[in-house]
Every structure is written in C-alpha cells, then in structure tokens.
C-alpha cells in the first residue's frame, strides 16, 4: 500500500485534493486545525467552510466560472457534487446552504476507509508526499516554516466578507423579488431613489473603519474591494457597480430605480440573506447604522457583520512548477488561494489538479498538461508564469489561449472557447481512463 499523503487543510482545495487521491487508491491523512484553533474568519467546525459568500458563481458556459465548473464536473469534483446536493436558489449562479454543503463534503470523505482525519495544528511544512492547502489565512507558524523551507517571502492582500441578515426582519413593503432582465425572482432588491442613495453614500464614506494591522496595509486585491473603498472613488461608483439598477424595475413605480442593493439567499430554508457586493471593514456598530439606511433594511437583524482579514499567498512564479508542485520536490504540492488563484471554484480546481497530479506522480505516470486552452490549465499556468507584479487571479477568458481565427462578438467568441475547452478536456479524460485500465 502507498504511503499516506498528508493533506494539510480541510477547506475546499484540501478536501478536493483528498478526494482525487482516494479515488485513485492513494491513502490520505487529512489535517484540520479546527477546533484546536480558528482563523480570524472561520467559525464552523466542519470541513469546506465557505467564509466570504455562499455563491460559487455562474454556471453557463459563456462565463469562465461556468466553464471551469463544466471542466471540473468531468473530472468528478467532490466539491461540485456536494454543491449541487446543497444548492439554494440564486438565478443563474450556483449557491449553497453553507452548513448542508459542509456536512455533505465531510460525509463523503469520512465514508472512505482511505481517509484518516486528524484534528491537529500543523506548524511545520511536512516532507512529501504532501499537499499544503491551508488557505489564505494560513497559521503564522506554518507560514514561517514554508518561508524558511522555500526561501521566499509570503505576500498579503485583503479579503472581506459581506453581512448576513434575517429574512423575517426585512421590510418587504419596500423590497421586491426579481433577477435582472426577468430571469426569475431569486434576489431580493432594495430600490433607492436619488435622494436615498445620496444620503446612504454620504453616511458610508464618512463611517468609521475598523483599524488595520501594519502587515495588512501592503496590498489590496482589486477583485474583493470593500464597499466603502469602492465608494471612495466617486459618488456614482456604486450605482454603476454593485448597486447598478440595470435590468430591474421597481413594481411599485414601474421604473428603474436610481440604485439597487441586492440580497442573495444564504441557506436552504431561505431565512438568511447576504448583501451582495457589501464586503466591508466598517466597525460593526457603523455597519448597523449605515446599512439600516438601505430601504427595507431599516430594522434588519444582522446575524453576521462584514469582516476584513489578512490573506496570504505564495510567490508562486518563483516557487511552483507544473501542476502546483514545489519546484524543489515534485512530491510536495500546494493548492488553494495560497497559490494565487482567487475564488471558491478556482481554489477547488487547484486542489483537484494537485491531488490528481500527485497521485499520478506516486504511481509513476506521466504528468498531464491541461494547457492554457482549459480554465483549469490556464489558472495553473498563470500562477507559475514569471510576473513581477504577481497578484491573485480569478477564472476569466482572458487567461486562455485565444482562438486562431477572428470571431466577431464576445458571446460567440466565448462559446467557441468553451467548446474547444470541453473537447480538449474530454480527450484528456479519455487518455487518463485508458492509462488507468
């Protein structure tokens, strides 16, 4: 029997990596520091905790996140399987009940005799075979050990979580249900006229912020800006950004509002909703005061306030080789947001690829290059490509190898990129299945 692979971290990437290993007959020792120690953002004891949002983004193939899901589904992603089992309404997006989702992931992994679950704080970077998937809030002791072993510094950027409110506390006389452009009614919409928007804006930009530690002042990741930082760029930045009213009409007036705050269902029962795009580092008392100015949220009960915390990612272009392997030891892999991929599905895809590729390395099989024509491959190529200004990256069509022929129209171009990716993925999977038999 093969030596167990140590998978450090039971978040999305770690759980996916563990799943891919045991599916190939490789035993796994899965380590999780909770409940011995919690990061500043984590609250639940279970595996695969979703912190910032309960949305796994779009599912349609003309969206890079949707294409990534289609690729991962073909590779038997555990996280996607459990997400579909725990999904809640979210229009064209895949959103889940957080607790049910976590329970599904844990049940699936612990039902395998190849998994040993260790609740233990790992403070030293282990020798291979291992996968380190401790996330953007990796404990300081392990961070220091990784830096010492690899000879590189860690970088920091900000991440933020949006507040969650109870449905029963909302004023539904001011709120209407609708998705943009008539595509269902999955979102709650809080419409603002110009006067209401201006009053809210003035309160937001003058509200008191929670202090930052010195080490948190270095970098801000553009993809996850706090709402107050976005607002500071100009009075109408929010109304043209996360509060844009396009595609929505207030049934009480029959007109498009000046701005709209959208709330998305956060649990299966539909009793909790999160404020879309409202990541923040306002002090909690200020969040209650300012966000209660939003029409319909006058008496909102906040079950979780927004928080801002430190995130850590590696200098991956100088540390990682193919398929998230440490460039000094192929039996050591990294996965998740600490590699420089940004987002739930992106993190999961890195865990999938790290687990699959390490299993092949252990079995003496050749590595697989998913190429930059798939989203999985393009993300992996991106984080190990030399880049003086390396920053975390979401799934997007811009990182894929572009089409050789000129295609007019973004939608058609994205469709062709997606078709090419799916064809290539099917060819790769057919090759894997042939090797395994």
Image: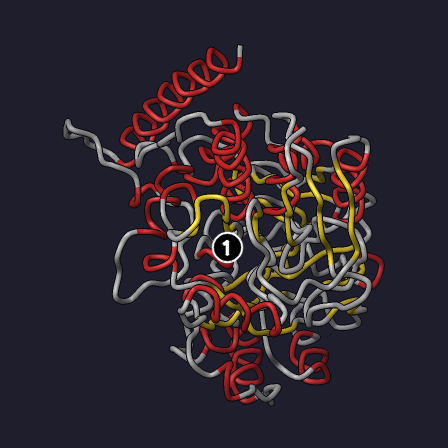
| Residue 20 position within the rendered picture, expressed as x and y whole percent measured from the top left | 60, 32
Residue lying at 65% horizontally and 33% vertically, measured from the top left: 78
Residue 44 visible in the picture? yes
Q: Is residue 374 or residue 20 the one in the foreground?
A: 20
Measured along the vertical axis of the image, is residue 27 above or below residue 351? above
Q: Quadrant of residue 87?
A: top right
Residue 337 position within the rendered picture, expressed as x and y whole percent measured from the top left:
51, 56
Work out whether 239 lies above or below 437.
Answer: below
Number of labels in the image equals 1
Q: Is residue 188 visible?
A: no
* 222 to the left or right of 35: left
The spot of residue 273 in percent (x, y) is 72, 56
Badge 1: residue crowd in 10 Å (few <14, some 14–19, many ≥20): some
97 or 262, which is in the foreground?
97
Judging by the rendered image, the residue that carries numbered circle 1 is: 256
Asked whether 110 or 249 is in front, the reply is: 110
């Amino acid at each position: 029997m093969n030596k167990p692979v140590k998978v450090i971290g039971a978040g999305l990437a770690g759980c996916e990596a563990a799943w891919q290993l045991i599916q190939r007959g490789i035993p796994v020792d899965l380590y999780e520091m909770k409940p011995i120690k919690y990061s500043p953002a984590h609250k639940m004891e279970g595996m695969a905790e979703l912190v910032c949002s309960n949305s796994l983004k779009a599912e349609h193939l003309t969206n890079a996140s949707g294409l990534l899901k289609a690729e991962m589904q073909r590779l038997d992603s555990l996280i996607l399987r459990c997400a579909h089992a725990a999904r809640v309404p979210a229009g064209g997006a895949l959103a889940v009940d957080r607790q049910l989702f976590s329970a599904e992931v844990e049940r699936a992994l612990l039902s395998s005799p190849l998994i040993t679950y260790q609740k233990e704080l790992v403070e030293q970077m282990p020798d291979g075979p291992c996968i380190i998937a401790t996330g953007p809030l990796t404990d300081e002791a392990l961070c220091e050990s990784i830096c010492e072993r690899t000879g590189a510094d860690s970088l920091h950027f900000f991440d933020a979580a949006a507040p969650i409110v109870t449905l029963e506390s909302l004023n539904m006389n001011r709120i209407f249900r609708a998705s943009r452009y008539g595509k269902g009614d999955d979102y709650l919409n809080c419409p603002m006229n110009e006067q209401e928007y201006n009053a809210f804006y003035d309160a937001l930009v003058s509200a008191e912020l929670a202090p930052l530690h010195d080490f948190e002042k270095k970098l801000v990741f553009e993809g996850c800006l706090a709402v107050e930082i976005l607002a500071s760029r100009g009075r109408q930045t929010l109304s043209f950004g996360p509060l844009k009213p396009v595609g929505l009409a207030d049934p009480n007036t029959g007109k498009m509002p000046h701005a709209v705050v959208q709330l998305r269902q956060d649990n299966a029962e539909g009793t909790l909703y999160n404020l879309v795009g409202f990541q923040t580092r306002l002090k909690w008392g200020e969040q209650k005061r300012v966000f209660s100015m939003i029409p319909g949220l006058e008496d909102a009960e906040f079950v979780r306030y927004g928080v801002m915390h430190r995130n850590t990612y590696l200098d991956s272009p100088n540390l990682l080789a193919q398929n998230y392997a440490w460039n000094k030891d192929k039996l050591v892999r990294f996965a998740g947001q600490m590699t420089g991929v940004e987002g739930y599905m992106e993190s999961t895809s890195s865990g999938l690829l790290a687990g699959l590729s390490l299993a092949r390395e252990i079995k003496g099989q050749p590595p697989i290059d998913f190429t930059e024509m798939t989203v999985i491959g393009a993300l992996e190529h991106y984080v190990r490509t030399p880049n003086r200004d390396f920053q975390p990256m979401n799934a997007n069509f811009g990182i894929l190898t572009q089409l050789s022929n000129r295609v007019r129209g973004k939608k058609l171009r994205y469709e062709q990129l997606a078709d090419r990716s799916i064809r290539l993925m099917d060819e790769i999977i057919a090759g894997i299945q042939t090797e395994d038999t």
